[in-house]
Amino acid sequence: MPYKLTREDVAWGIEESAAIRAAGNSNPAVLHALLDYHKRTLRELAGCSPNANVSGSNMGTYESPLTAAIRVNSPEKVRMLLASGADPMGIHI
């Protein structure tokens, strides 16, 4: 049975987007469901995008779903994000 997204799964958090949170989640089904949700909406849902970046220049931290997947050492999630259009060139500041 596929993962069923919750309201919290798609919400933009204080310091991270929904996609960053899903990419860092130990369950790859969460990211897969979120990317499918983003693809089906026909409009840009900023926090669910594979390019939903967060910049915290005042703290010197920058994060994207792709960097979150790399940080948790998940090649499966990296491939999933790239296949969904994540920008491999990094975070746009």
Image (tube, rainbow, N blue to C red):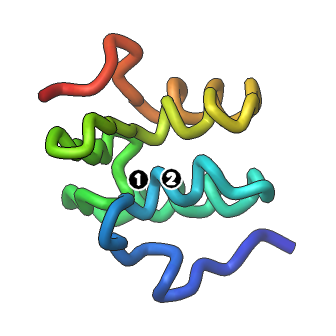
Labels 2, 1: front one: 2
Number of disc labels? 2
What number is the disc on residue 35?
2
Residue that protrudes farthest toward the right in the picture: 1
Residue that protrudes farthest toward the top in the picture: 89
Q: Position of residue 37 (x, y in %)?
A: 47, 64
Q: Residue at x 74, y 24 (%)?
A: 75
Image vertical order of residue 60 relative to residue 58, above or below: above
> Around disc 1, counting alpha carbons within 10 Å, would you say few (fewer than 14), some (14 to 19), or many (20 or more)?
some
Residue type marked 2: Leu
Q: Residue at x 61, y 36 (%)?
A: 69
Q: Nearer the viewer, residue 73 or 11?
A: 73
- Do tag 2 and tag 1 residues touch (Cβ < 8 Å)? yes
Q: Position of residue 2 (x, y in %)?
A: 78, 69
Q: Position of residue 14 (x, y in %)?
A: 31, 71
Q: Position of residue 33 (x, y in %)?
A: 61, 62
> Around disc 2, counting alpha carbons within 10 Å, would you say few (fewer than 14), some (14 to 19), or many (20 or more)?
many
Which image quadrant: the N terminus? bottom right
- Name the secondary structure under disc 2: helix
Name the residue carrying label 1. Answer: 39
Q: Nearer the viewer, residue 3 or 25?
A: 25
Residue type marked 1: Lys
Asked whether, in this view, residue 33 is left or right of residue 17, the answer is right
- Name the secondary structure under disc 1: helix
